[in-house]
Amino acid sequence: MSEYVSNLSEDLAAVAGELSTARHDTVLLAAAISKAATRLVPAAEYVSVVVVTNGTIELTGAADDLAETCDSLQSDLGEGPSLHASVHGGTVVINDVSREKRWPRFIQAAAEVGVRAMMCVPFDAGENKSGSVNMYSSSAGVFTDQSREVGELFTAHAAVAFTAGRENEQLHQAVQGRDVIGQAKGMIMERFSVDADHAFGLLRKLSQDSNVKLSQIAQRVIETGADNAAPTPVPRRTSDSNGNSMHPDVHRQAG
């Protein structure tokens, strides 16, 4: 076992480099973690990663169809070892699904698609979210103590990569969103001769009225043009008799 763990440490270091390539996309990162687990965890034929919020699966990433199917089954049925491990903590090992009495609807469905054994290892996904790395096998009795030890060690390392990846994704999205909003503001300012505050105000109003994220509204402006994005005419600035720039409402009051 010590020789295996020594090799595993080297493998985990290599996996860290692989996972860094998907650091801006948690779905791709989850799939990369799943693929790595099939290589490193004994008896793990099919692997997936799920993230759970308030008892509901919000994100999945699988390296193969069978693991993805099992995730979908648990999500649809609202029960299963992955959900249990994620919500309550503690590794769940089922070495023979034919003898498992918990989660009967999922167990029956999993058996029908060829699953005979499974192991679900939980992890903290950050931001009050939890998750699990789920390992499935088409053979019964294959998840040994070694499988569990390696699975838990792998998941601990994967959780660090996943949390860092989630933070990178959020930062990347924030930067992209800021750039998109800035570009849309510029288009509105140029098209309607308004200042930055008025342009941003229009974007924000469109976002609130349509219940769509501000960055998505901005992207729509970029793709369709400022005219198509505006539900009502955007106010233009006017000038008084002395040539001073005025908002049209002020101009009407002055007149």
Image (cartoon, rainbow, N blue to C red):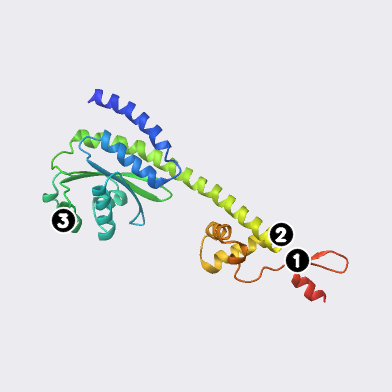
For residue 192, side relative to residue 83 (left or right): right
Instruction: Work out whether mark 2 precedes mark 1 in sequence or the reverse, and give the earlier one.
Output: 2
Q: Amino acid at mark 3?
A: Gln
> Label 1 sits on what residue type?
Arg
Q: Residue furthest top?
A: 3
Q: Is residue 234 visible?
A: yes
User: Which residue corresponds to mark 2?
Assistant: 195
**Badge 2 vs badge 1, beta-carbon distance below 8 Å:** yes
Q: Amino acid at mark 2?
A: Asp
Vertical arrangement, residue 201 with respect to residue 146, above or below: below
Could you tell me if residue 102 is visible in this image?
no
**Which disc is residue 237 wearing?**
1
**Residue in the image at 57% along x and 58% along y:** 218
Residue 108: mark in rendering = 3
Name the quadrant containing residue 206: bottom right
Q: CA distance from mark 2 to mark 1?
A: 9 Å
Query: x%, y% of residue 27?
Result: 38, 47
Q: Check disc 1: other Cα within 10 Å, few if <14, some if 14-19, many if 20+.
A: some
| Disc number lying in front (3 or 2) | 2
Q: Earlier in the sequence, mark 3 or mark 2?
A: 3
Closer to the observer: label 1 or label 3?
Answer: 1
Q: How crowded is the residue under tag 3: few (<14 C-alpha within 10 Å), some, or many (20+)? A: some
From this viewpoint, which residue is outermost toward the front? 224
Sequence-wise, which precedes: disc 1 or disc 3?
Answer: 3
Q: Quadrant of the N terminus?
A: top left
Tell me the residue at 52%/58% (across/down): 216
